[in-house]
Image: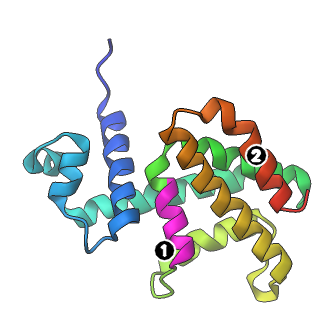
């Protein structure tokens, strides 16, 4: 069996830390909790990330990279059903591959920090990908998008936890598309 690379190890640490930040918030998550979650000593964890803040920054950077990649992947599609389907599919994949970061994304959506410019920018990238103009919000579209993607994230987490990802994937996509009005 191949040993994981440093990049793979760091990605696993980032995802597990994101899940803890989603559950307990940054201030109430300790380095020891993160170390325990990834099976490292605190010193071992600090070998990969020099501080809790550096780890949190890596989590936010990973979230931003994911959102930017999703947005770039749909720019050539017109706003509408094709674009929505591509974003739903990509979000399901991400929720299965990086459940911790996905959970943090849901937490941020529920409890946004208007003082945090980085998180606001990430949200605006997602809005743009979905064809939402923050200066001219359509409440019906906003509620549908929120319902679709929050429901998708939670349901994907349940599927992943119960090892039902393959069985539920199509149903999650269909439910999200229904919520979007398609």
As drawn, is 101 to the left or to the right of 154? left
Estimate the spatial distance between the alpha carbons at disc 1 and disc 2, rounded to whole Å: 28 Å
Q: Is residue 14 above or below residue 124?
A: above
As drawn, is 49 to the left or to the right of 4? left
Q: Earlier in the sequence, mark 1 or mark 2?
A: 1
**For residue 103: magenta?**
yes
Q: Position of residue 73 (x, y in %)?
A: 73, 48
Residue 61, visible in the rendered structure: yes
Residue 38's quadrant in the figure?
Answer: top left
Residue ID for mark 1? 118
Residue furthest top in the image: 1
Q: Position of residue 40 (x, y in %)?
A: 16, 41
Residue ID for mark 2? 173
Residue 7: mark: none
**Residue shown at the point (57%, 41%) measured from the top left:** 159
Q: Which residues are magenta?
A: 102-111
Where disc 2 sits, the SS reads: helix
């Amino acid at each position: 069996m191949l040993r994981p690379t440093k990049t793979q190890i760091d990605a696993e640490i980032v995802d597990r830390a994101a899940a803890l930040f989603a559950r307990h918030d940054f201030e109430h998550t300790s380095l020891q909790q993160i170390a325990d979650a990834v099976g490292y000593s605190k010193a071992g964890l600090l070998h990969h990330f020099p501080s809790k803040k550096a780890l949190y920054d890596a989590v936010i950077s990973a979230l931003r990279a994911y959102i930017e990649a999703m947005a770039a992947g749909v720019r050539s599609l017109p706003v509408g059903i094709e674009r929505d389907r591509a974003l739903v599919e990509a979000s399901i994949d991400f929720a299965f591959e990086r459940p911790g970061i996905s959970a943090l994304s849901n937490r941020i959506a529920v409890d946004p920090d208007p003082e945090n410019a980085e998180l606001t920018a990430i949200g605006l990238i997602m809005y743009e990908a979905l064809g939402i103009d923050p200066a001219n919000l359509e409440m019906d579209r906003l509620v549908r998008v929120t319902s679709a993607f929050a429901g998708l994230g939670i349901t994907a987490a349940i599927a992943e936890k119960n090892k039902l990802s393959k069985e539920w994937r199509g149903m999650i996509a269909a439910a999200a598309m229904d919520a979007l009005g398609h």
